[in-house]
Structure formats: C-alpha cells, structure tokens
Amino acid sequence: MTINPDLQGRSYPAAEVYDVGREKIREFARAVKATHPAHFDVDAAKALGHTDLVAPPTFAIIIAQRADAQLIEDPEAGIDFSRVVHADQRFTHHRPILAGDRLVAELHVDGVRAMGGGAMITTRSEIFALGTDDSREPVTTTTSSILVRGEGQ
Amino acid sequence: MSPTFNELSAGQEIGSRTIEVTRTDLVKYAGASGDFNPIHWNEAFATGVELPGVIAHGMFTMGSAVQLVSDWAGDPAAVVDFQTRFTKPVLVTDTTGTPEPGATIEVSGTIGKLDAEAGTARVDLTVVSAGQKVLMKAQAVVRLS
C-alpha cells in the first residue's frame, strides 16, 4: 500500500459538532491524572474568571483525532492504520476550551513526504466554537505528524 | 499563588512529578480520548506489530506531563501553547492485581525562555521513563500576569 502524494493541500470541511460536557472534561482530566480544581469544580473555574469548567491543555486531541479519522479512513489516502506512529503534536490555544462549547474542526493536510517505504503526514485542525448565530470563534489550532511505517520499518 | 513574570528567570526549575502508570490507566485513557488502538491494551496485538509490548498512548504521556505546568501556573487556561515530539515508547508491563505500577514517568520542568513583549514563559519539560527520554522538545508556553 502506498500513500497518495496528492493528499498534500487537501482539506476536509467541518463535519459533526462536538458538544463539550462537564463530565467529559472531568473524565478526561482524571484520565491524564490532572488534579487542578478548574477541571472539576465550576466555582473554582469561575473564581479564575472562566464561565465554566476548563478543559485540560490536551483535551482538543479528542476533536483533532476525530477530524484525522476522516483522512485515515479515506480509501483514497492509502493509509494502513496499524502501521501509524504518532511523531509529534502541538496545541495552540487562542482561548481555553470550556464546558458548554460547541466545537467543529476543519482538517488540512499540510505535508506529505516519503520516508523509506513509508511517509510522514502532517495535518492541522482548526477548531472553532459555534456561536448562537452560527458565527465561528477560533479556539484551538492543533498540528500533528504521523509516520506511516513502510514494510520492514 | 500564580507566578508573576518579573520573579522568573531562564533556567529556573518549576518542580517535578512522578506519574505511575498501569494497564488500567491506559484503558481509562482510551475510553476518555476515543483512541482505541489495540497496541495500548492488547499484548498479543502489540507484539504482533513488532512492539516490545503494550505501550502508553503518546497523548497519555503528553497530557499527564503538562499537569506539572497547569498546577505551577495556577490556571490550566494559562497554557496557551504546548508541543512535543514522541521519541521513545513508554512500555507498560501488566501488573494487574498487584499494587505495583506497570511503568513510571518522571517529569521535571525548567524555564526555557521568557518573552517580555508577549508576557509569556516557555517551560521546557524533561520526561523520562525507564531511563530514556520519551518526549523531546516538550515545551509549554504559559501566559503570566
């Protein structure tokens, strides 16, 4: 199986809406062994000036990996998921993710380069919060590189 | 107490933390994140794809390492940028039914750079498991008052 070089520059528009719930923030925070009260206690989050619980700094990976799945599962991409290794990851927060946010992600394939028999693929998710009038507020930009190992790698 | 920009200098240590990891923790992270890749919970699958055994999600390691920074900053929302490269896997042995962890991750942080104009500090994290650096260029940018 070979990676389709024409993937570079491809975009996948925002698909389903992700509703950020308080219990999901608490569950994710426990799963990364976070203890900061702003993830668990609404009053503690408000005391810091936030409107609701604050998501941990890597919470956006849930939304970003859902967006990435569109690419990985795209039969045209030629990616064998069992040979995928996560190489690097970055989160740039334009504002914190808070409980009550309704988020969507636009996926961009920024780079595809052959490495050995495999390929390094860099994707970027632009995550926006939807307003009541369907306005979009930039919340987080995530970038991620995955290495798809070739045979014998 | 949150740190203030003027009391910080490059090279200053912000503290350290030890994270114990079990197979149960990886199952919890899989459920919480939606990443159900079997290399993180199934030994036979992991060894079948030429891994030494079940390994932690890179995002588990990255996500648990940043807690040191959130706690130091006093507000997790102060972490405005966080990046890393994943260099070595964290092998988690099966210690189910015992009080022993399957792996231990040591995290320590140092102020790498201060940006007076932006009012931010870059915290450089050193993240080690089984004597090897498992993250490289693990950098969290914190907005300070």
Image (spheres, rainbow, N blue to C red):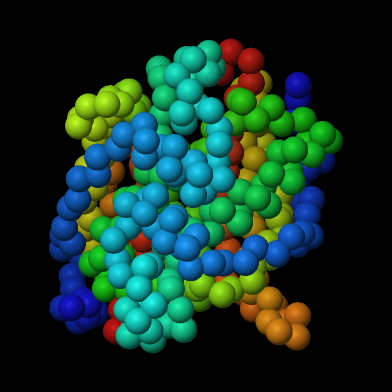
Identify which residue, B55 or A10, lies in the foreground. B55
**Residue B133 visible in rendering:** no
For the C terminus of chain A, give its image quadrant: top right
Q: Position of residue B29 (x, y in %)?
A: 44, 44
**Residue B71 visible in rendering:** yes
Q: Position of residue A94 (x, y in %)?
A: 53, 74
- Name above or below for residue A23 compared with residue B63: below
For the N terminus of chain A, give its image quadrant: top right
Q: What residue appears at the point 71 percent right and 84 percent down from the top-left corner?
A: A132
Toward the front, the furthest residue is: B97
A88 left or right, relative to B26: right
Q: What residue appears at the point 49 percent right and 55 percent down from the top-left corner?
A: A90
Identify which residue, B130 or B35, lies in the foreground. B35
- Name above or below for residue A3 compared with residue A18: above
A31 left or right, relative to A19: left
- Name above or below for residue A3 compared with residue B105: above
* Quarter residue A147 falls in: top right
Q: Position of residue B31 (x, y in %)?
A: 50, 44
A30 left or right, relative to A65: left
Disc tally is 0
- Name above or below for residue A92 compared with residue A77: below
Q: What residue appears at the point 71 percent right and 31 percent down from the top-left corner?
A: A79
Q: Position of residue B100 (x, y in %)?
A: 20, 30
Q: What residue appears at the point 65 percent right and 50 percent down from the top-left corner?
A: A66
